[in-house]
């Protein structure tokens, strides 16, 4: 029966692909398709679960597809199914179906009707990939799909400034989680000398053995997983992205941020509990972080004067509680809590506009003038302090911005020399010599060869930093981002010498994407002249097709499965050795920043307020 | 200021789109919505016949740069240039949050600690008594606590040069006009909030400036130079004259042609309609007085089809009775009359039997931590059931605004004043008999109903039920301050049935027969349901017959409305449509429970006879008026006085929300977030949204209101000139005015201060014989772009009733 698992991913994915082919104006068809997919998916999931329960709910697992194999290592796609998957699949299935039916009427005649349902289907596929994943590699692919579809859903109203800005903001926190997952996976490959399935952790004897053998490395893995959980479930100190993700139509906010996307952090925690529960320190950290989140988020929720932010923070607080439950081993409770919270917040968000009528009515009949609190001034001071801090969201938003992205921005701005012609020539020379070096490895002295990969990764990182902070030429930004991918590719090639087919897959895809991107930018420049990156241009208003093309180029460059480089990138980390800290850190940072950099470019060129004002254009503040 | 001068100026200063786009007019011309002969007539009139060809070329093919650069914001934007800082991004999120927390009416569980001296005083007290601060720099904290803190001190730091101060403040406040606007509104009318807050625009500006200084200090320390020292230069007056360009004329001509393409059709239709001789007074089966609201126009038409012997009339929906209403157990009063009026009367409700239910899922504890977790673990699953039900079994709930819930159906109202001293908070409870008689007389005379009373006269107010809709007030009765008019209808009916009142009326020449009863009722314009009040005291047989006529008319009305709703097939059996329409008003997933005043374009003041046989597609405010009873136009002044502010106001609101939905409207309502129970904004950091959401205006053709008065032109002229605030609307062309001469049946158009004859270009109006065929075959809009959307609006037809 485990053979059916793959259908739960392919089916929504097929729905997504089919939806791309349907015409934009065919609302009935588009919504019908999405609802049909969700309904069948739910029916299938229910039938599957019932059958599974009757079979005394075994832990199901299937190795679906071996992507790559060498003597010591195997990279494969793996699915599994257990009570955690069941809880998420059924809850997610019910919510997704109901909200899609809701949206069919709700989104009627909205400019992005098709975009909405297509993105939702993509999200839905990614969601299932995560919850049915049997190993980290599979989970990570789903994780990335969720990231990109979240970006598109938050920036749904792409002709306004705030949704686009907040989509980038949320994406940047997500990317941080991605780096952590990449690092965790890399370390796992070395600790277990291969690709590890979640089921392997069920064997506590061998797990204990491994942990005793590699105490530092395994703790590192546990902490990285925990960090990924914190970003995804908006736990301390990453809570402030959550209310800012509610930019799309109420229904999409409800289903994706209110329930499904945010609870995936808790899912990951449950999925990996047999591993991290071996570390008392990690357990304590989870409990502490959950408690801090619960406290801060609930206080923030209490001072919110707007309905949706109040629901958002209340939900974050409940997820903090779920963290504690999981850490204490109350897995069942956590799962019930998840389902209850997901349903409740979805419902509350969907009906959030009704709160106006309900509470005004309530006030009309039950109002009693507030009596000003008096008390000892110490209590008052504490109360006021908490009030103000909660209104400021405990400065978490500013903190994240300052501590996470400012260092990159500041460094990036120092790298202006990279943009000169001389450095351009130099860089190309270095790139070429890298290729030469790869061909004639034997001619490079050993010590140099040892440091070369690290050097290339550092250059890649410098390029992507420059690209990330580029405020003028889009072409330069794009070239730098593409260049970064090339340098990274060479770094890895020099390090481990993958076979030629591998390299062709990777560089072929990257080159195609880079060329496509350059083509798009030339076209855009020809039509619009000014394509500087110092502002949002909103060009999608006039260049819908070009925007789509450039977006595909972005995805290609990022290693999404639109070109062949997709396989390459996921293989990267198996080629970096355990002790190559420089290489792994700069590679992971480069990969994370490339996505931010090219999507920022995409956003600035094509999204935001349209710069031409011959038609109604939104205010910046609206 | 004249309409076009004013909107052109506003457009140039604030960067608004104030008309449709040039390309849109051209599309409308190409698809025939703007008629060629009308366009030519407009050009000839404005530019002379000799220039017809030149201007036709310019209008249809000329190239113009149509971008709308704004004056506002240009000066303040230079922060970015000189300091590479975006003050909006660093100041607005916190500013909005502080403001919203202060004004919040009951969303937050921990409230802003209030000081009785107002906003800044509260903020100062908060800052003083806490260990945290909203400010990061010492300087701003110190400045805040200066009691004599003035705008000049702060502007000196930020701007430097006094001549730029005004520019800067306008730039700043217009960067978040939603919040500035609402603060200014609360300053003027604190009673707009139930839980009142003391706040002034000046306080908002002070805080705004402080936060800006704070943001600069946090980034550059306390030593940075004011903005004007960098920019230099002399300011150009922000509100100085705007330059004329040929494009202005192009837009004016197109807009007029767009308007007259429809007006001409209407006048041609009315010319046919008014040909039919006025019916001699005959036995009426019943009479029904509706609100002038254009949504009632179709219901009246259907009622007359179902029962040709009935008579329908129209008058503003508060029915001339102005008062505050206090529902039983209500802690506040609802104003039930046009917004500018301040009533001196209070009507209290007692013995209401409708108990308000609660909805646990809305409970504030759901947002707390520990109790919240119990909620989540238990009611979370109830929410799943509710999710399912709201989808498949929509029904009325306490969270849905229910038009019929405004007043208990069988409750008692304190309509008659018992003693002049019976007052509450300075308001007289109920009306004296004399006061009642005066109001009943005024209304009956204004609509010309002073004889031939039918046995039952229905007084039909309207309201609208809708779910999940923060804009629900915009669907209720505009003449009742955006509330359902049920109480007014009941109060008026009670007054008109009052023996003492009738006696007084008889003495004044209005003899209402003993057998005639007035019945108050409420029509829910979204659900197409009707509720009758105090029907126990009337002839039930007769009422039953009439009620069934109402039901049939509502059936037809629902069918007519359904043609605009994509989710309701118009061809299905009528009872299915009725059900779908009713469910629509309680469906949480439905952003268009009804379409409000969308498409409103006409206001016709005169006898129903001239419009009875004309199909106006729910686009006309219909105010009954009989010129024969008012040869001097004495009553006409009273009738016309509210038309500008009420109908013209509604029309302009739809106009501007339609032409620039982003800046003058509210955008799409789907991402809206309810702020503090007094506004909506997009998501969490957005500015408050003014105007109407796109879901309400997409069917609307942005044309000015055409008012048609059935009376002699000289009387109409005298009437509108009788009050300057009324005349302004007409002489400045914010509405169009046509007088229909009752003797010659000739139309006279008011232009440049006088009436001149107008002969419609259209000579033949199509006849529609089968209403069902008409609505079933009407096309729906493909997109809500104007050239598409307007195809949904039907032309004027002559109705042939079989």
Image (cartoon, helix red, strand yellow):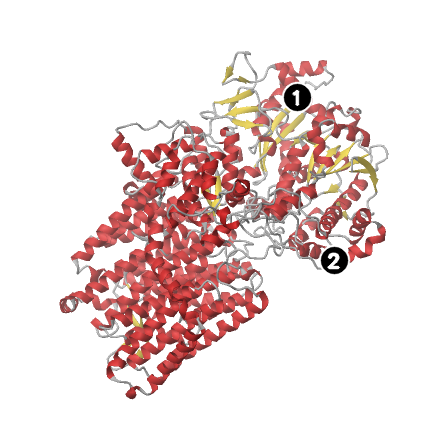
Which percent across, then down, holds residue A566?
A: 39, 73
Visible in this render: residue A39?
A: no
| Picture coordinates of residue B141, whole percent (x, y) | 36, 38
The label nearer to you, 2 versus 1, is 2
Q: Residues within 10 Å of mark 2 (few under 14, many from 20)?
A: some
Residue in the foreground of this view, choosing between A337 and B238: B238
Q: Residue A557's x, y, as percent?
A: 42, 71
Confirm whether residue B127 shows in the render. yes
Look at the image and tell me in which quarter the N terminus of chain B lies: top right
Q: Which mark is residue B60?
A: 2
Query: Left or right: where does residue B716 sit relative to residue A479?
Result: right
Could you tell me residue A14's position as x and y percent? 45, 68
Q: Nearer the viewer, residue B674 or B238?
A: B238
Checking the image for residue B440, the label placed there is 1
Q: Is residue B380 above or below residue B504?
A: below
Q: Secondary structure at mark 1?
A: helix
Looking at the image, residue A330 sits to the left or right of residue B758; the answer is left
Q: Quadrant of residue B542?
A: top right
């Amino acid at each position: 029966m485990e053979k059916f698992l793959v259908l739960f991913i392919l089916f929504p994915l097929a729905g997504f692909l089919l939806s791309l082919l349907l015409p934009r104006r065919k609302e009935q068809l588009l919504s019908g398709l999405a609802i049909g997919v969700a309904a069948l998916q739910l029916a299938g999931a229910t039938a599957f679960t019932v059958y599974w329960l009757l079979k005394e709910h075994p832990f199901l697992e299937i190795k679906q597809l071996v992507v790559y194999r060498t003597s010591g290592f195997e990279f494969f796609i793996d699915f599994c199914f257990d009570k955690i998957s069941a809880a998420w699949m059924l809850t997610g299935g019910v919510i997704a179906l109901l909200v899609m039916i809701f949206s069919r009427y709700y989104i009627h005649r909205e400019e992005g009707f098709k975009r909405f349902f297509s993105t939702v289907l993509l999200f839905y596929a990614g969601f299932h990939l995560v919850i049915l994943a049997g190993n980290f590699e599979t989970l990570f692919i789903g994780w990335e799909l969720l990231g990109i579809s979240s970006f598109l859903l938050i920036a749904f109203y792409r002709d306004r400034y705030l949704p686009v800005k907040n989509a980038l903001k949320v994406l940047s926190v997500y990317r941080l989680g991605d780096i952590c997952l990449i690092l965790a996976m890399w370390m796992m490959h070395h600790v277990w000398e291969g690709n590890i399935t979640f089921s392997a952790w069920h064997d506590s004897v061998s797990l204990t053995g491994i942990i005793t053998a590699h105490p530092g490395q395994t703790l590192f893995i546990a902490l990285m997983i925990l960090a990924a959980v914190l970003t995804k479930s908006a736990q301390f100190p990453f809570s402030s992205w959550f209310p800012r993700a509610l930019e799309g139509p109420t229904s999409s906010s409800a289903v994706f941020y209110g329930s499904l996307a945010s609870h995936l952090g808790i899912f990951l925690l449950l999925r990996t509990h047999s591993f991290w529960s071996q570390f008392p320190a990690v357990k304590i950290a989870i409990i502490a972080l959950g408690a801090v989140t619960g406290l801060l988020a609930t206080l923030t929720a209490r001072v919110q004067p707007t309905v949706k932010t109040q629901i958002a923070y209340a939900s974050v607080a409940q997820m903090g509680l779920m963290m504690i439950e999981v850490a204490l081993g109350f897995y069942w409770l956590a799962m019930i809590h998840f389902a209850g919270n997901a349903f409740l917040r979805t419902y509350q968000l969907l009906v959030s506009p009704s709160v106006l009528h309900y509470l005004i009515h309530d006030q009309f009949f039950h109002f009693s003038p507030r009596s000003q609190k008096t008390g000892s001034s110490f209590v008052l001071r504490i109360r006021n302090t908490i009030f103000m801090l909660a209104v400021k969201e405990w400065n978490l938003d500013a903190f994240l911005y300052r501590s996470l992205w400012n260092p990159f921005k500041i460094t990036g701005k120092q790298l202006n020399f990279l943009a000169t012609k001389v450095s351009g020539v130099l860089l190309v020379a270095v790139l070429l010599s890298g290729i030469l070096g790869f061909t004639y490895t034997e001619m490079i002295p050993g010590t140099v060869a040892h440091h070369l990969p690290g050097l290339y990764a550092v250059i890649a990182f410098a390029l992507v930093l420059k690209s990330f902070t580029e405020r003028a030429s889009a072409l330069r930004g794009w070239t730098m981002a593409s260049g970064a991918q090339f340098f990274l590719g060479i770094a890895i090639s020099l390090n481990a010498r993958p076979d030629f087919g591998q390299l062709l897959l990777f560089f072929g895809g990257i080159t195609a994407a880079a060329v496509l991107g350059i083509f798009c930018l030339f076209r855009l420049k020809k039509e619009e002249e000014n394509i500087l990156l110092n502002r949002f241009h909103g060009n999608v208003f006039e260049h819908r097709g070009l925007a789509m093309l450039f977006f595909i180029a972005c995805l290609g460059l990022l290693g999404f499965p639109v070109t062949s480089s997709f396989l390459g990138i996921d293989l990267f980390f198996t080629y970096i050795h355990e002790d190559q800290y420089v290489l792994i850190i700069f590679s992971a940072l480069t990969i994370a920043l490339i996505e931010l950099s090219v999507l920022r470019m995409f956003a600035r060129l094509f999204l935001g307020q349209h710069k031409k004002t011959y038609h109604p254009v939104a205010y910046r503040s609206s | 200021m004249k309409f076009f001068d004013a909107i052109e100026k506003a457009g140039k200063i604030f960067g608004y789109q104030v008309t449709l786009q040039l390309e849109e007019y051209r599309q409308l011309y190409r698809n025939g919505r703007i008629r060629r002969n009308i366009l030519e007539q407009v050009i000839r009139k404005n530019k002379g016949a000799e220039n017809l060809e030149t201007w036709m070329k310019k209008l249809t093919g000329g190239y113009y740069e149509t971008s709308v650069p704004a004056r506002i914001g240009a000066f303040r934007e230079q922060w970015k240039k000189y300091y590479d800082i975006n003050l909006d991004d660093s100041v607005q999120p916190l500013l909005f949050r502080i403001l919203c927390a202060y004004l919040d009416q009951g969303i937050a569980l921990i409230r802003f600690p209030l000081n009785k001296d107002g906003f800044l005083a509260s903020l100062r007290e908060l800052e003083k008594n806490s260990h945290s601060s909203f400010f990061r720099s010492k300087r701003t904290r110190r400045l805040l606590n200066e009691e004599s803190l003035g705008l000049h001190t702060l502007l000196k730091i930020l701007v430097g040069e006094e001549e730029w101060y005004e520019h800067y403040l306008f730039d700043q406040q217009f960067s978040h006009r939603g919040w500035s606007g609402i603060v200014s509104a609360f300053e003027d009318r604190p009673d707009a909030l139930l839980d009142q807050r003391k706040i002034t625009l000046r306080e908002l500006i002070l805080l705004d400036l402080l936060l800006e200084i704070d943001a600069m200090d946090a980034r550059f320390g306390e030593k940075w130079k004011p903005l004007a020292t960098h920019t230099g230069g002399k300011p150009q007056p922000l509100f100085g004259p705007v330059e004329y360009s040929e494009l202005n004329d192009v837009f004016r001509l197109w807009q007029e042609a767009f308007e007259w393409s429809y007006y001409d059709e209407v006048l041609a239709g009315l010319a046919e309609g008014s040909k039919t001789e006025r019916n001699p007074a005959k036995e009426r089966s019943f009479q029904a007085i509706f609100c002038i609201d254009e949504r009632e126009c179709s219901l009246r038409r259907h009622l007359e089809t179902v029962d040709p012997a009935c008579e329908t009339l129209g008058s503003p929906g508060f029915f001339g009775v102005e008062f505050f209403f206090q529902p039983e157990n209500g802690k506040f009063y609802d104003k039930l009359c046009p917004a500018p009026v301040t009533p001196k009367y209070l009507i209290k409700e007692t013995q209401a039997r409708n108990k308000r239910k609660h909805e646990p899922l809305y409970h504030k504890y759901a947002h707390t931590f520990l109790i919240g977790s119990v909620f989540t673990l238990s009611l979370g699953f109830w929410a799943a059931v509710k999710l399912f039900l709201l989808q498949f079994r929509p029904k009325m709930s306490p969270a849905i605004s229910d038009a019929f819930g405004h007043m208990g159906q069988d409750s008692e109202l304190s309509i008659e004043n018992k003693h002049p001293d019976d007052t509450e908070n300075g308001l007289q409870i109920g009306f004296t008999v004399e006061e009642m008689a005066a109001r009943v007389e005024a209304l009956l005379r204004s609509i010309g109903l002073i004889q031939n009373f039918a046995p039952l006269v229905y007084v039909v107010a309207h309201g609208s039920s809708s779910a999940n809709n923060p804009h629900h007030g915009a669907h209720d009765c505009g003449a009742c301050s955006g509330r359902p008019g049920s109480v007014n209808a009941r109060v008026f009916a009670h007054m008109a049935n009052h023996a003492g009142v009738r006696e007084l009326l008889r003495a004044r020449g209005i003899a209402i027969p003993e057998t005639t009863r007035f019945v108050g009722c409420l029509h829910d314009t979204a659900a197409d349901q009707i509720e009758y009040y105090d029907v126990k005291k009337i002839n039930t047989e007769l009422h039953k017959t009439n009620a069934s006529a109402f039901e049939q008319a509502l059936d037809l009305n629902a069918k007519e409305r359904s043609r605009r709703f994509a989710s309701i097939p118009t061809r299905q059996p009528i009872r299915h449509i009725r059900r779908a329409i009713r469910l629509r008003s309680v469906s949480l997933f439905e952003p268009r429970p009804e379409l409000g005043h969308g498409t409103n374009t006409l206001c016709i003041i005169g006898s129903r006879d001239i419009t009875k046989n004309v199909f106006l597609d729910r686009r006309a405010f219909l105010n009954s008026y009989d010129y024969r009873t008012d040869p001097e136009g004495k009553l006409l002044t009273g009738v016309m006085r509210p038309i500008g502010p009420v109908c013209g106001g509604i029309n302009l609101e739809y106009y501007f929300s339609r032409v620039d939905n982003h800046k003058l409207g509210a955008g799409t309502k789907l991402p809206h977030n309810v702020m503090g129970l007094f506004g909506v904004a997009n998501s969490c950091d957005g500015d408050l949204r003014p105007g109407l959401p796109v879901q309400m205006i997409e069917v609307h053709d942005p044309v000015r209101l055409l008012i048609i008065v059935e009376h002699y032109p000289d009387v109409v002229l005298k009437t509108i000139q009788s009050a300057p605030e009324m005349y302004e609307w007409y002489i400045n062309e914010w509405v169009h005015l046509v007088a229909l001469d009752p003797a010659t049946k000739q139309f006279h158009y008011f232009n440049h201060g006088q009436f001149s004859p107008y002969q419609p270009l259209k000579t033949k109006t199509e006849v529609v014989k089968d209403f069902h065929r008409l609505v079933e075959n009407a096309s729906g809009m493909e997109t809500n772009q104007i050239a598409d959307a307007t195809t949904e609006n039907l032309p004027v037809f002559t109705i042939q009733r079989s």
